Amino acid sequence: MKVTIPDLGDIKSDLLIFGGPYSNLAATESLLEQANSLEIKPSHIICTGDIVAYCAEPEQTSQLILNSGMSVVMGNCEESLASDSNDCGCGFEHNMLCSVLSEKWYSYAQQNISNNTREWMSTLPPAIEFTCGGKKFRVIHGGVDQVNQFIFASTEPTLKQQQFDKLNIDCIIGGHCGLPFGQQLGNKHWLNAGVIGLPANDGTQQGWYLLLHPTKNTVEISWHRLSYPVQKSYDSMLQAGLNEYAESLVSGLWPGTDILPLTEKSAQGLPLTIPAVIL
Ligand SMILES: [Fe+2]
């Protein structure tokens, strides 16, 4: 079956891209408030997927995003929930701590979202394209052909290059791995917008989002931290018994790091800084 990729056309004003709301309602509310204060309308906001995951408010977070009118790419969590799979589809191996922990939050999410929300998730596209500052962009979740492919900053450039070879695209913006980064590969760029629902394992409590600012022939791209009322999400997670990831919101560190390559693992607890890029 041929999949249709929505094209938002030529974007002439600021665009906000973020990922991984992860059932974190307070973080998602803060993201929308931030977009509003930047005068960015929902038509200029794109989510890279995984609306539902580790935190305690899957239905409310999904409804907030659905009703906002923003564009959303399907993540592996949406794919799994839409098909009523008994696994989050993150791609964890069975003996990983992340896999053991996912059984708990995924079954909580399964029990706490509505059929209407699952139905909406099933309609989400695997990618979204747009043009900005004369460059062609594709927003995806994990990899170009594989929704749950982990692509980190340290992932070999050849693997990223191979994905560009299949497309006529200048810049790919992904999510899924939970860590924001920007990388130039020849005349192409691979970016990760980061996530708002969990910290970036850097010992701080904030999430991350990406801003694109188009000028006539260029686009300025910058990463920003998102602060939000952490205590609110922490309390609701404790109430739901999701303790491990609740602690993570406070400490800024992930409870399991077995998905991380050595480079990203050794950066745990070091506050991230990401330089802006101009395309
Ligand atoms: Fe994901």
Image (spheres, rainbow, N blue to C red):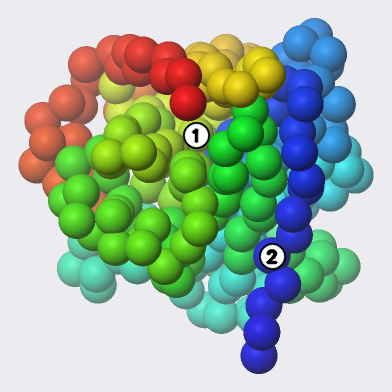
Quarter of the image for the N terminus: give it: bottom right
Residue extending furthest toward the top: 37
Residue at left offset 29%, top offset 54%: 160
Query: What amino acid type should be assigned to the residue bearing mark 1?
Result: Ala
**Image quadrant assignment for residue 94:** bottom left
Query: Which numbered dot is residue 5?
Result: 2
Q: Please provide percent x and percent y for residue 88.
A: 48, 67
**Which one is earlier in the sequence, the residue at label 2 or at label 1?**
2
- Label 1: element kind: loop
Task: Give the vertical position of 28 relative to 64 (above or below).
Answer: above
**Residue at the far bottom in the pictured view:** 1
Label at residue 193: 1
Which residue: 47% across, 42% down? 171
Q: Position of residue 111 (x, y in %)?
A: 68, 66
Distance (Cα) linking label 2 and label 1? 19 Å
Task: Tell me which amino acid carries mark 2.
Answer: Ile
Q: Residue at x 36, y 22 (%)?
A: 252
Residue nearer the viewer, 55 or 123: 123
Q: Where residue 147 sits: x, y (%)?
A: 47, 66
